[in-house]
Amino acid sequence: MFEPHRSTDEQRRPWWLPSVATGLIAAALLALMTWQVVARGPFIAWDWPLHVYVDARHPDGWVKLVLDSIASLGGQRLYTLPIIVGVGAWVSYRQRRIRPLVAIGAGLATVFFVGYWIKFDLARTPPASEQDILHGVGQAFPSGHTANATLTWCLIVIVLLGAQGLRPDPVRFRRWLAVALVIVFVSGALMTLLDYHWLSDIPGGWMLGLLALMVSVTVLRAPRLPWPRWLPGHALLARLDGAG
């Protein structure tokens, strides 16, 4: 679903099939992980042992400062939000269409609403509380930090180098997508190694981020967005949207 150029067989398939199918798989896996957290299943078996291990070896001083900075830049909304919105605004300006910004907004809304729905419903306590309970004081699962990283860095590559991107380039696309995935992995790993999240929170964040990413990709690939007539400026938005 990420490839910037498609084969003839792929072009015969419905435009929405790859992204919607991948999004449904991500949603199903996220639901399975959530059920495992609630049921205290084997999915969370390594959470407490890893917490005990990293807590005894927690870095301090300048090492912690550097790792915190890397982790924050990778997935903290305070940093990722202006980056992804800024890139989206620039791509929209260069393409003379609003679609990239709408796609980014759809992905961000998915992370926010689905993520906080699960977070507030479970209220899982973080490792710093020294207890792993549900309906306590916490929002550990899924990791919003990891979800933000997954959506932000992969979507930036897609809107810049993907098929509907600013400068489609299959070679550079694959190259930079690999870099984005490394950033996503490192950001998630640091959240666990710095003891901010349980280990199981991280794949939950990956699936939430992938779900949001597929929502954004679906919006990007749609032939034309159905702008409702009651929306202020719908005619202008429709013209800016283009044929998709």
Image (tube, rainbow, N blue to C red):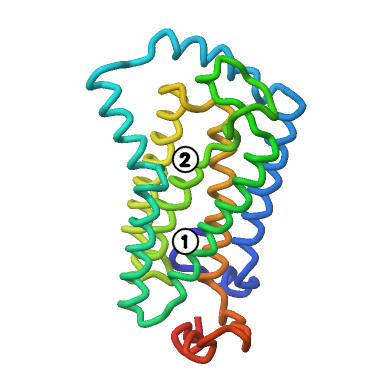
Q: Quadrant of residue 8?
A: bottom right
Can you say which quadrant of the picture contains the N terminus?
Answer: bottom right
Q: Is mark 1 on a helix, strand or loop?
A: loop
In the rendering, at what x and y percent does residue 145 appear?
Answer: 47, 40
Choose between 67 and 117: the one closer to the eye. Answer: 117
- Left or right of residue 66: residue 155: right
Going from N to C along the chain, the mark reached first, 1 or 2, is: 1
Considering the numbered disc 2 on the image, is that residue within a helix, a strand or a loop? Answer: helix
Question: Considering only vertical position in the picture, is 56 above or below 44?
Answer: above
Farthest-out residue, left: 62
Which residue is pictured at 30% across the width and 77% down the height? 94
Mark pair 1, 2: CA separation: 26 Å
**Image point (66%, 58%), residue name:** 21
Residue type at numbered disc 1: Glu
Indicate left or right for 28 with 3 as reference. right
Residue 4 horizontal/vertical position (percent): 43, 65
Q: Would you place residue 166 above or below residue 170 in this image?
A: below
Q: Mark 2 points at which residue?
A: 145
Q: Where is residue 67 in the image (x, y as percent from the top left)?
A: 31, 28
Crowding at mark 1 (Cα within 10 Å: few <14, some 14-19, many 20+) = some
Quick one: 220 or 227, which is closer to the camera?
A: 227
Q: For mark 1, what is the residue?
A: 3
Q: Which residue is drawn at 45% across and 68% down?
A: 5
Left or right, residue 29 beside residue 185: right
